Image (cartoon, rainbow, N blue to C red):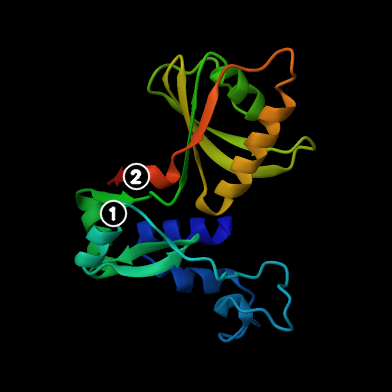
Amino acid sequence: SDLIEKIDLWSYHLGCNPRQTLRRLIPKRTHKNSPLLRGKPEGGESPAGTIMTTDAPLLRTPLYAWHASHNGRIVEFGGWEMPVQYSSIVDEHHAVRKAAGLFDISHMGRLSFSGLDAEPFLSNLLTCRVDNLVDGQIRYGLVCQETGGVLDDILVYKLDAMNFGLVVNASNRNKIVAWIQQHAANLNPADHALDFEFVDQTNSSAMIAVQG
C-alpha cells in the first residue's frame, strides 16, 4: 500500500527500523502474528487495511545485481525486490546526514508524455498547473477521480515544450496507467484526437535519488 511504501522510505531515510515504525502505527491489540503483519488473510478474505502479498513474481530494478553483489538486504517492496540496508542503519543514517546517499527508487512508476497536446492533457489530468512549468522544473500534484477522490500523489516534470514525465507510487502504477488510458479515450473523440504519445517507461529505465 501507499502507506507502507512511504513508511519504509521515511524509516530508511530517518534511520529507523521500518517494521518498528509500522508497529507503532498499528493498534496495540494487534498481535505480532496477526495477518496485518504477516500479510496472510484469515478465512480467505482480506480485512480493510491488511498488508497483502500476492503470488505475482516480484520485479527487479536494473540495479538489482549491484545491490545483491554488495550484500544489500533485499525485501519485497511494492511488488519489487528492493534493498533496505547494506551495513548498519546507524552507519547509513550518518553517511547520508554527513555526506550523501544514492537511493535506487526505480520501483516508482515513470510515465512519459510527448507531443503537441501532452501539456494540455496533463493539465486536464492533474490538480496542479502544468502550463507554466519551465524546462527542467518538477511540481507536486494529485491524480483524482471525477468525484475528487485521490488516486495517487505524483510528481510531474517538464523536459521541454513537447516532453513531460510523471512519477507515481509503485503500488499505484497499474491503476494510474489504466486511469490515464481511460482518461485519454474520453478526451479523444473521433473528430478531434489529441496529439500526444503516452509510454510507461518503468521497466525500461532506472531512477536514482541523491539525498544528503
Q: Residue at x 72, y 68 (%)?
A: 48
Q: Residue at x 58, y 48 (%)?
A: 174
Q: Residue at x 68, y 43 (%)?
A: 150
Pointers 1 and 2 in contact (C-beta within 8 Å)? yes
**Dot placed on the residue nearer the N-terminal end, 1 or 2:** 1
Q: Which mark is residue 63?
A: 1
As measured in the structure, the alpha-carbon distance from the residue carrying label 1 to the one carrying label 2 is: 8 Å
Query: What residue type is disc 1 on?
Result: Leu
Q: Residues within 10 Å of mark 2 (few under 14, many from 20)?
A: some
- Residue 193 lies, in percent from the top left, at 67, 17
Query: 195 and 97: which one is in front?
Result: 195
Query: 110 and 88: which one is in front?
Result: 110
Query: What residue type is disc 2 on?
Result: Ala
- Residue 35 lies, in percent from the top left, at 62, 80
Query: 28 and 151: which one is in front?
Result: 151
- Residue 67 lies, in percent from the top left, at 26, 61
Q: Which mark is residue 206?
A: 2
